[in-house]
Image (spheres, rainbow, N blue to C red):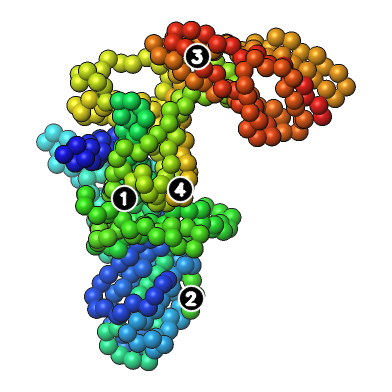
Amino acid sequence: METKISKSILTILFLSSCLFAAKEPVSEGNSVAVTVYNDNFAVVKERRPIVFDKGLNTIRFTDVASSIDPTSVSFQCLSAPGKIAILEQNYEYDLVNTFSLMNRYIDKEINISIKGSGADKGTEVAGTLLAARDNNLILKNDNGQLEIISEGSVRNISLAQLPEGLVTRPTLIWLAQSETAGSQQCQVTYTTANISWKADYSAILNAAENALDISGWVTIDNQSGAAYKDATVKLIAGDVRRVEEPRPQEMMKMRGMVAGAGAPAFEEKSFMDYHIYTLQRPSTINNNQTKQIEFITPALNVPAKKIYLYERSKNDKKVQVKFEFENKKENGLGIALPKGKVRVFKKDTDGMLAPLETGRLKRPSGIVDALSLTGLEFVGEDLIDHTPKNEKLSLYIGDAFDIAVEYKLIDSKVATRTRWEKHSIELRNRKDSPVTVFVDEKFPAWVNWKIEESNKPYVKKDAATARFTVDIAADSNATVEYSVTQRW
């Protein structure tokens, strides 16, 4: 029962805190597959039946993403391989809107209805449009007079027809040579920008602060200019290299191109040097939509270690609070975890709405009041990078309020290519329980250093770090004093 409740809480918590391969059989009808990458782009594979005449054809392929990269388009005729060739492609993206219509009607006749006021029902003005700029329309009427009409006074504008060259939606226009006639099943593949995904995680600390319940969700943000209905959705995690050619902003779009809570919602697998997460059901991703889907089954009671760490090189007045855990199968994890934000919560033991806590923690981007209804309080957040299975993760969630630090450089001497220093780090534990604080002292990579004297044990963690382990009793003080010689 507790397991089911914990999984439910993880689901509610996340929603509150957030907002190519083997040959496939040819199937008739429309279908679409979208593979979304971390770096704000996707590969779209769309299958449609297209009717061809034998010989030359002009084919209009509509409903492509307005953020398409036309140079990436690939065409395949699946039902008649080798029988159809694309000789030329044009990408038409000059969409119908007020600005484009007015520009196409320069030096042409238009009719404008002017708003009236009170009993005045307004007037009709006809003439030749000379300019449309600065929120004004400039007309030359039948008498040869110029009229400047402000945008705010216009009720409507009547145009004779849709100007040539404007389209209602982004369209690929192909000149195709076909050796056969009839309906053929075709696949078009292209890349598009302005669609991205990210991972978000929620972690709930237990009362003893030695274990976490962890859930993971993906957020897909589609601003590509197209909707993908009942799509096969794949997400690729990893740093895929792309070559971006420097181009002026106005050339970013080309005018033409010659081309030749049971089971997890996602199935994860390794793919080259990346990882693919495939949604196990079709999903519709609408344009201008943010979609959230659970991608890992909540992992319960993941062992975690709380660490207090003082790094003077990062902040000489604060002690960091960190939690470490391992991405292992026996912990309910053991999969490739995509980079993303981890939000950490803990239940308030009195079961009531907790007062505003004082202290410095890493705040979330937005948490709604629903969290308080479950007794869960936000205690910090951190970002993780792409993390393979069996690797350790460390979450820096904030700074300890009740552990004060005072650092002093007691003495120093400088000689030829040598520096001797004596340091003091006083740690004052104002908690009602003992703590252990790790003190990491950093030295420049280009010096040889040696600690001459120290009142606390230490280890050489790496070439630039000495780590002291300091045990401090409840409501008491402890001081690290050491001297070091650096030579270069």
**Foreground: disc 1 or disc 3:** 3
* Position of 111 relative to 344 (above/below): below
Q: Is residue 20 left or right of residue 246?
A: left
> Residue 434 at x, y = what percent?
44, 15
Q: Does dot 3 land on a helix, a strand or a loop?
A: strand
Image quarter in which the C terminus is found = top right
Residue that label 1 marks: 295
Distance Cα–Cα, label 2 vs label 3: 71 Å
The x and y percentages for residue 189 are 40, 69
Q: Residues within 10 Å of mark 1 (few under 14, many from 20)?
A: many
Mark 2–mark 4 contact, CB under 8 Å? no
Residue 70 location (% of width, % of height):
45, 66
Where does label 4 land, which residue? 390
Of callouts 2 and 1, which one flags the residue occurring earlier in the amino acid sequence?
2
Q: Residue at 23% of width from left, 75% of height from top? A: 29
Amino acid type at image mark 4 = Asn
**Disc 2 to disc 4, C-alpha distance:** 46 Å
The reply to whether the C-beta atoms of the residues labelled 1 and 3 are less than 8 Å apart is no
Going from N to C along the chain, the mark reached first, 2 or 4, is 2
Residue 138 appears anywhere in the view: no
- The foreground one among 154 and 286 is 286
